[in-house]
Image: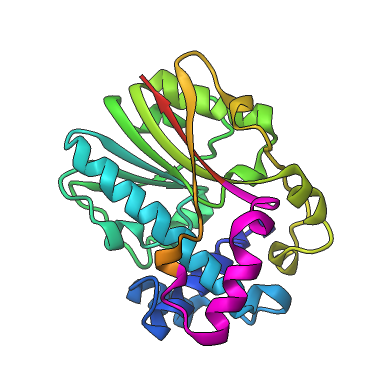
Amino acid sequence: MNNVNKTLYIPLYGKAYVSRKGIILNDKKAEEIWNAEGFELKGKSKSKWLAYYMGMRSAVFDNWLAEQMKKDSEAVVLHIGCGMDSRILRVGADGHQWHDIDFPNVIEERKKYYAEDDSYHMVEADVRKQNWLSAIPKAKHAIVVMEGVSMYFEPQELKVILEQICAHYETVNLLMDCYTTFAAKASKYKNPINDVGVTLVYGLDEPREVESTNFKFYKEHEMTPDFLINELEGMEKAIFKKLYSGGIAKKMYRMYEYIQG
């Protein structure tokens, strides 16, 4: 597994960590996979603060996705860069066609722990390739989750990927998290992903930079909302709120929702 793919273990550790503590996420599958596959993390990768942050980020994505799925029972779900994430178990397909998408070696690893059925599909694909959507049936409406993915693409490359998605569907709702350009530059020196050998990432300061015809920025989301911070207690809650939410956090990390149609 290459270094970029190894980054999937950082959020997996975070989700397993908060699940074991009984806060933010209930993710027994993350606990199971980390116990079996996890390796010794070092530096910031094993920080409890990062674990809380990863758990909260995933919970925000989960809640948004569940809400979008309720609005359209016919929509397909695309989870791009799924890694070993158990969102399919936390949210549930609920009759939707759900496609978890990642590199072939990641999907091969994933199949040790997840089984496909009539609703749930695992797709081997490099989304930088022109024909990556050919394995996914067309539909009218797609709900797309890109968690911890956008920062590995230059903005123009990301725009092309988004345009390909929009060409495949009539309407699209998409949520993704992004580094700022400041965070991307700082990541060369201080980022948990450095601990697995990744130093090259990209930032997006202006969400409209990746807009295209009919695909428009809709709104920004809070990655560490108060209702999730409130699951922490005492000094941990106070420290997390000061360092990982509000203006300081937004200088580093943003979450953008887009709509087509």
Q: Which residues are drawn in magenta?
A: 229-254
In the foreground, 33 or 95 = 95
Does residue 79 appear left or right of residue 11 in this picture?
A: left
Q: Image point 43% across, 73% down: which residue?
A: 230
User: Per the image, is 51 magenta?
Assistant: no
Establish if 38 lies above or below 205: below
* Residue 176 appears in view: yes
Q: Image point 67% across, 32% down: which residue?
A: 155
Image quadrant holding the C terminus, namely top left
Establish if 166 lies above or below 120: above
Image quadrant holding the N terminus, namely bottom right
Q: Image point 20% across, 46% down: which residue?
A: 119
Quadrant in the rendering for residue 26: bottom left
User: Per the image, is 243 magenta?
Assistant: yes
Quadrant in the rendering for residue 191: bottom right
| Picture coordinates of residue 35, whole percent (x, y) | 46, 83
* Residue 137 appears in view: no
Tell me how the rendering is colored.
rainbow
| Picture coordinates of residue 154, whole percent (x, y) | 70, 35
| Picture coordinates of residue 50, whole percent (x, y) | 60, 71
Does residue 240 appear left or right of residue 189 in this picture?
A: left
Quadrant in the rendering for residue 198: bottom right
